[in-house]
Image: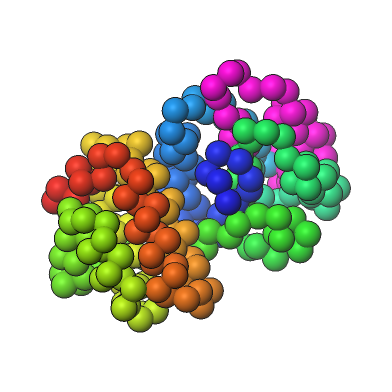
Amino acid sequence: MSYESGAFVFLVDDDQGNTIAKELIRFAREAVPGKRVEPIVVSPVGSTIGIDQTRAALAQASLSATPGAIKLVIFEAADTLTMEAQNSLLKKLEDPPANTLFILATRNQYSLLATVRSRCQLMDLQTYEVQGNEETMSLALKLLKGSEQRALCAVSRMTREEGLALTESLANIFERALNTSPWVAARGLWIVLKAYTQLKDNASPGLCLEAMVSRLFELSGLEGCACR
């Protein structure tokens, strides 16, 4: 799925809802290369996000974006979307506007209709922890500073557990770089979290990690994020 179109569900817990998820949403606005982001943020009114709010946001999203821009539609506390609101959103997810990215942040993915979830890519931040021992951190830094071919060779032999440790260390590195290299760090963090989520879902470690490495090495300025 492209990072400049489509939909994501960010699965967060209470603490992360105020930290990691909000930071990712903030930096997602800088994560699409060469395009300005036009945000549309939808928050609960009272205890729910209702049909009128949702329709208004979707109508705004349907308007043509400024040339060279992308629309970012953020539903905060998406678990508070009413059934009517979700059905309205579903129609838009089935036929999304061009250059429009939807992010649904929720503490409970099952509060969303199965049909809504099926049209989104899940980013599970509830099980995500920034960690990694010194050995894994050293390997992560070497991967970022070395050649793509060597990195691909290294990850192709990794087990699922080794891959999870590597993605956690890489996430740590990119989070540290958000203040100094926000654009490349934001993109890198998205790529790494996608790989982490796929590994958690029992994806093939070799294929998953090789795809992650290939995408990371497409970023210019990647080596700058590896400075400790």
Query: x, y (%) of residue 181?
Result: 27, 37
From this view, report whether residue 68 is shown above or below residue 151: above
Q: Indicate whether residue 95 is drawn in magenta.
A: no
- Say whether residue 128 is visible: no
Q: Is residue 27 above or below residue 196?
A: above
The answer to whether residue 102 is left or right of residue 178 is right
Residue at (42%, 75%) from the top-left corner?
A: 205
Q: Position of residue 188 (x, y in %)?
A: 36, 49
Please state the horizontal and vertical placement of residue 50, each as a whole percent of the image. Answer: 79, 41
**Residue in front for this viewpoint, 138 or 221:** 221
- Tell me the quarter of the picture where residue 133 sits: bottom left
Toward the front, the furthest residue is 149
Q: Is residue 199 visible?
A: yes
Residue in front for this viewpoint, 223 or 196: 223
Q: Is residue 67 magenta?
A: yes
On screen, residue 221 versus residue 22, left or right, reads left
How many numbered circles does the render carry?
0
Residue sitting farthest toward the top = 66
Magenta residue span? 45-73
In the picture provided, is 52 more to the left or to the right than 169? right
The colour scheme applied to this rendered structure is rainbow
Tell me what residue is drawn at x 67 percent, y 33 percent.
98
Position of 29 with respect to 210 (left or right) is right
- The residue closer to the viewer here, 63 or 73, is 63
Q: Is residue 192 above or below residue 60?
A: below
| Residue 46, percent from left and from top | 71, 41
- Give me the residue at 31% from left, 70% from top: 155
Residue sitting at 73 percent across and 40 percent down? Answer: 96
